[in-house]
Amino acid sequence: MYGIAALAGASPLLDAEKESWLAHNLIFDERYRALALDLLSNFKSGSELSLSCSDRRRAGCSYKHCFVTNGTWIFEFNTTSEDSSIYGARVLIRRVNEAAGELRHAASLQGPFLMDDAIRNRMRQLVGLKNYSLCLRNCEHVARYVLTGRWVSLQLNEGGALFEFFRSAFVEDVRKLLNAMPHTLVRTPQWIAGDGKSQLAYKATEPFLRQHEETYNVLVVGPRSSGKTSLIRSLFCGPPARLRAEPDGNAESSSDTAIEPTSDVSFFRGCTKVASNDQDVILIDTVGFADPKFQDRDLLAVMKRRVMANTRRIHHVIGVVSYLETAAESFEGVALVGKWLRAHCHKSSFVILVNKAEAVQTAEEEDRVRAYLNSVAQHVLGYQWSAQQILFYDCLSDSDAALKRRQALQQSLFGQVTSPMVLED
Ligand SMILES: Nc1nc2c(ncn2[C@@H]2O[C@H](COP(=O)(O)OP(=O)(O)OP(=O)(O)O)[C@@H](O)[C@H]2O)c(=O)[nH]1
Ligand SMILES: [Mg+2]
């Protein structure tokens, strides 16, 4: 017996937890924030940090309390000496309790991570945080966000202790928030502005979708830095040379057009003709695979839940790989997505897009690359892609050849209506 059912619906834990689901943002305790900011310098640049954890149990719910430590100091979302309720927890910095052998009783989950400015900035962002939530803003979200930039708690993945405990209490709106960035941390790209040649007109960047909307959905996956976000941008805007900075459309600068690594699933809405009908299209941008800080299968589990909480229909999948990085490991994440969605049964829905392919100029070179990719696909996936499924692309180029490649991709995605793959648990 486990989970919310065991609490007979009357648990104070469940009441407090449900209250914490009402708004997914960050609220701070300024006193704790000031105290922790004074202690931040105890995490010296270049020092080794680890993600560690100890076992916890509250009102029948067992989970791992995660924290960041350099061996002497701890950064964590934990209860304080003033309030022992988890909902009174604060993000704080404190010394390791050496007398109690604290770290000897903890397990190291991952590390070392080297302390740097990015980690320091994220620590600074979160110190003093107070609106704890076991499901939306827990100690693991905070520790992993600080170390990796991703708001992820693996305990909220399918099969994870917290997911299973609260499973029956989740309603649709809450499922959408699991492992989603708090609103306060979401950074909406400012670069969207059409080049007038795009078939796809940009409408909005949305954190969530309405489940039962009849949109045409394209899932974009691939290893990190292969150009997934650049691809989406190019489908809306053309190459960066054609970008104008919003909102006033003035001259661009590199900071207006630079793309940051994607840290959460995001939904880009546009409108185009699919076959000959006007249709709202959602391009789903995802977090890159082959990231040394996460295992591909954990990233896939997070992606699955984030996508499925928002839509159950996927019309196309684009597996973006970089021509400059075609080692077999770069395909493993795409292969996992292929297995999840049974790509071999939906061949017309899957495209492998070889991005950064400006050096691939002739049909013979393309065929040579296709043959190489298929030898990798055979090894990683157990089957091969057809020639029509392996397309070439260059997001940054303004040439006629690049424009033709964009048109070929658009044709493959929107030239005819494809029936959606229906996602099931
Ligand atoms: N040469 C070249 N560089 C590209 C191309 N497309 C993207 N890039 C560069 O590759 C880098 C990564 O691009 P992103 O679009 O952020 O890649 P991503 O797959 O979204 O990366 P993550 O979100 O970190 O997984 C950026 O510096 C881009 O400018 C391309 O076609 N050619
Ligand atoms: Mg990206």
Image (spheres, grey):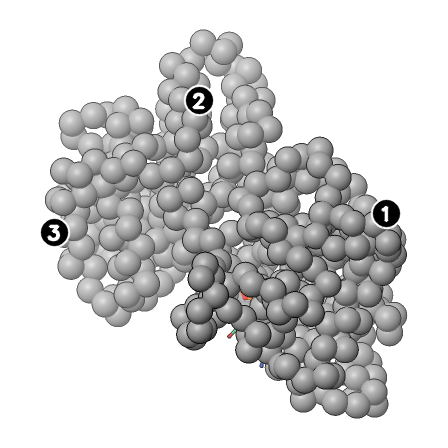
Please, what is the three-letter code of the amino acid marked with disc 1?
A: Ser
Q: Nearer the viewer, mark 1 or mark 2?
A: 1
Ligand 1, image quadrant it occupies: bottom right
Q: Which residue occupies 42% across, 13% down?
A: 11
In depth, the one of 183 and 38 nearer the eye is 183
Circle 3 packing at 10 Å, graded few (<14), some (14-19), many (20+), is few
Per the image, the residue denoted by label 1 is 419
Give the total of numbered labels.
Answer: 3
Q: Which residue occupies 62% across, 69% down?
A: 195
SS assignment at label 3 = helix
Per the image, the residue denoted by label 3 is 38
Whole-angstrom CA distance, mark 1 to mark 2, is 38 Å
Mark 2 and ligand 1: say if the CB distance to the nearest ligand atom is below 8 Å.
no
Mark nearer the N terminus (3 vs 2): 2
Please, what is the three-letter code of the amino acid marked with disc 2?
A: Lys
Q: Is residue 216 left or right of residue 188?
A: right
In depth, the one of 249 and 119 nearer the eye is 249
Circle 1 packing at 10 Å, graded few (<14), some (14-19), many (20+), is some
Q: Is residue 156 left or right of residue 50?
A: right
Residue 344 higher or lower than 84, as above or below: below
Contact between labelled residues 2 and 1, with CB atoms less than 8 Å apart: no
Whole-angstrom CA distance, mark 3 to mark 2, is 33 Å
In depth, the one of 184 and 397 nearer the eye is 397
Residue 64 image point, x, y percent: 40, 38
Please, what is the three-letter code of the amino acid marked with disc 3?
A: Asp
Quadrant location, the C terminus: top right
Per the image, the residue denoted by label 2 is 18
Residue 136 higher or lower than 114, as above or below: above
SS assignment at label 2 = helix
In this rendering, does residue 261 appear at all? Answer: no
SS assignment at label 1 = loop
